[in-house]
Image (cartoon, helix red, strand yellow):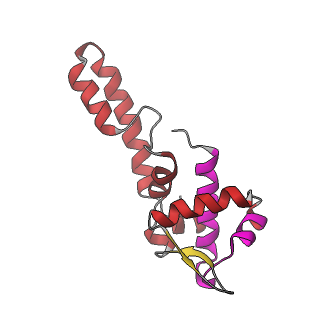
Amino acid sequence: MQISQKGLYALEAAIYLARHYDEGAIKIHRIAEEEKLPEKFLESILLELKRARILESVRGANGGYRLKRRPSQIFLGEIIRTIDGPVAAFGDAEVLRRLVERDKKHSALFRVFLSVRNAAAEIVDHTSLGDVCNGRK
């Protein structure tokens, strides 16, 4: 599984917001400064996560971004798919399943790729921001 730099920034920002969940909304500048992330790039990433209903924004002097759900209810797979698309470098599960059925000569190889994809998806889809913050995984 390969995650882009943008995906890593999204995960870092989400983990930061999870660690500070009880503080409410956090300003972009604070996240960028403390996590050493480029502020303008982070702004576009947070907007994508907001559109995906992972984050919400709060306006005003005490405004900023916060997680829309508790850290234990947001999984790494959601964030990765929002920013980078399918979890596996081999493509999404449906494409691999079609290859297994269509290309009998190489179906064993595609089944291996599907197994790798499924294992990676299983891990990120069952690891929450809360798990990462608490060092459980």
Q: Quadrant of residue 33?
A: bottom right
Q: Magenta span covers which residues?
A: 5-33
Q: Quadrant of residue 113?
A: top left
Secondary structure character of the magenta stretch overall:
helix
Q: Residue at x 59, y 67 (%)?
A: 133
Q: Residue at x 50, y 51 (%)?
A: 80
Direction from residue 30 to residue 100 in the image, left or right = left
Q: Is residue 49 visible?
A: yes
Q: Viewer-proximal residue, 82 or 110?
A: 82
Residue 53 x/y as whole percent:
44, 68
Q: Viewer-proximal residue, 33 or 133?
A: 33
Residue 70 x/y as whole percent:
48, 76
- Image label count: 0
Q: Residue at x 29, y 37 (%)?
A: 94
114 inside magenta stretch: no
Direction from residue 92 to residue 80 in the image, left or right = right
Q: Residue at x 64, y 46 (%)?
A: 5
